[in-house]
Image (tube, grey):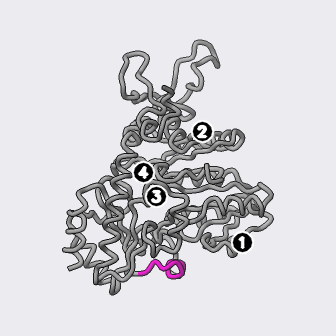
Amino acid sequence: MDKENARFATRCIHAGCRPDPTTGAISVPVYMTSTYAQTSPGVFKEPYDYSRSANPTRTALETNLASLEGAKYGLSFGSGVATIDCCCHLLNTGDHILLCDDVYGGTYRIFKRVFEQMGISITRVDMTDHDATRAAFTDKTRMVWLETPTNPTLKVIDIAAISQMAKDATGGKAFVVADNTFATPALQNPLSLGADVVSHSTTKYLGGHADVVGGALMVNDDDLHERLKFVQNSVGAVPGPMDCFLTLRSTKTLHLRMQRHCENAAKVAGHLVEHAKVDRVVYPGLDSHPQHNVAKKQMCGGFGGMITAFLKGGINESRGFLEKLQLFTLAESLGGVESLIEHPGIMTHASVPAEERAKLGISDSLVRFSVGVEDVSDIIDDIDQALA
């Protein structure tokens, strides 16, 4: 059978991976080389002339990631924010970016404190409000960047609707980038919904073990791929071969891990809803989620492993809860097999100004759960003892 066109779980394991032709090794080797021999000046085994441009371990990872997203091309990077940098380098001074209002703090920082200083204007808008989004386009809009579910308030943005809106509003001049980090290709494929580019922090669920930092872009359009690849090579924010190997090792279990993340998070969210010390729970799988119907439409197989909860009380109650947890680790990042928890206002979103956090509802009582794959009863027991 054609492994490259097999079903998702099979592609997780086999896409981009072939036994090593020299030894027959099942695992893709870690090609620890910076350069490659040429038989004559300019004559080499395409595309391998220098490892910033291409490395066989990276090629395997990029092929695998492209397959999982249903994309023609994959490009890997040294971090998630490096994918933002690459996309923004396609723009010119005077261009306009439409950015969804609720994004990871590092995403906000690079847009507002790096690229806005270079003469690219940025408008943040709640993309769950289609009227407000439509009104925010200008004749200079050249890129739309969205996360769904968003970080940390877990808004669910209708990718198909926003993609069509961008085409209508700009005559196709703006490309749409969807950050699929929270959902992963196991649950959501933005390219099939009209997005032009998919971005990932592979540090999170794709890496899945809290031991590697990386990023990736996936795309179908030939021209857009060539432009992005040129920037990838020119700027050089590429991952090393060991990082590629670790990420490729991890995607082999993505389908299994995401199934357990989703199952555990659904049970934890249901438990938190009933807890007397929890004021409100935000989880796309709950009927109470404002965009639950959108989530059901564009996410398949589950609603992810991320939960946002508002505890009763203020910063003292939140701090006390976070300090008393024993199974959960208080740490930034997310998507690993181990359960993590954090306080966005103090930690991941500290770079967002306080007034902006307040508008988004990122209050002192908000905590963000990254529900791991441990036994769910142990996860719930830990939450209960800390809340008690």
Question: Element type at marker 3?
Answer: loop
Asked if the residue under mark 4 is in contact with the one under mark 2, i.e. CB atoms within 8 Å, the reply is no
Question: Element type at marker 1?
Answer: helix
264 sits left or right of 349 in the view: left
Viewer-closest of 303 and 15: 303
Q: Is residue 80 above or below residue 148?
A: above
Asked if the residue under mark 2 is in contact with the one under mark 1, i.e. CB atoms within 8 Å, the reply is no
Q: Of tags 3 and 4, which is closer to the observer?
A: 3
User: Residue 182, which numbered label?
Assistant: 3
Label 2 Cα crowd, 10 Å radius (few <14 / some 14-19 / many 20+): many
Q: Which residue is mark 4?
A: 203
Q: Is residue 248 above or below residue 284?
A: above
374 sits left or right of 98 in the view: left
The segment highlighted magenta reads 356-363
Residue that protrudes farthest toward the top in the picture: 39
Q: CA distance from mark 3 to mark 4?
A: 11 Å
Question: Element type at marker 4?
Answer: loop
Q: Position of residue 285 (x, y in %)?
A: 43, 66
Label 1 vs 4, first from the N-terminus: 1
Q: Which residue is mark 1?
A: 136
Q: Which residue is mark 2?
A: 73
